[in-house]
Amino acid sequence: MTRMLWMAAGWTAFGAGLVGAVLPLLPTVPFMLLAAFCFARGSERIHAWLTTHPRFGPAIDDWRVHGAISRRGKRWALGSMAASFGISLALGVAAPVLAVQAAVLGVVAVFILTRPDRPAPGG
């Protein structure tokens, strides 16, 4: 039963990551990291497939081995966060909500910016 719950959580995270691959304001990599975490506990076969996937595997491996986020990933994440905040401003969201959003996005931005870059190939 526990394996089935991990699998369900993994597929849910994977699905959210796929949606994030086409919607610019929804992140992909954090959901794929979560999916890999869940699949590691639910299915070795699916975990191996995801971590060796040509599109998703390198980012998962960079995070797992080095705690790293690529520069491109950082730019996309920060750009998406800025766009999200800009949309909130344009929609006239209430000031207290904007303050909370700014605080959360600020903390996340600091976290992203303090992660190392992806190591050079062969490095």
Image (tube, rainbow, N blue to C red):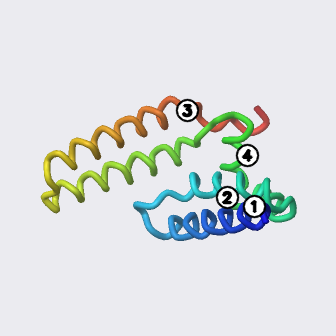
Q: Which residue is mark 2?
A: 35
In the image, residue 38 sits, relative to residue 122, either above or below, namely below
| Inter-mark Cα distance, 3 to 1 | 23 Å
- Of marks 3 and 4, which one's residue comes earlier in the chain? 4
Q: Which residue is mark 4?
A: 61
In the image, residue 32 sits, relative to residue 11, either above or below, namely above
The answer to the question of whether label 2 and label 1 lie on touching residues, with beta carbons closer than 8 A, is yes
Where is residue 48 drawn, in percent x and y? 83, 58
For residue 78, side relative to residue 64 (left or right): left
| Nearer-the-camera pick, 70 or 28 | 28
Q: Around disc 2, counting alpha carbons within 10 Å, would you say few (fewer than 14), some (14 to 19), or many (20 or more)? A: many
Where is residue 10 drawn, in percent x and y? 68, 63
| Nearer-the-camera pick, 85 or 116 | 85
Where is residue 54 drawn, in percent x and y? 74, 61
Q: Which residue is mark 3?
A: 115
Q: Residue furthest front?
A: 1
- Of marks 4 and 1, which one's residue comes earlier in the chain? 1
| Residue located 45% across and 49% down the image | 77
Element class at badge 4: helix
Q: Around disc 4, counting alpha carbons within 10 Å, would you say few (fewer than 14), some (14 to 19), or many (20 or more)? A: some
Inspect the image, locate mark 4, and give the three-letter code of the amino acid beneath it.
Asp
Quadrant in which the C terminus is drawn: top right
Element class at badge 1: helix
| Residue located 69% across and 34% down the image | 66
The disc at residue 50 is 1
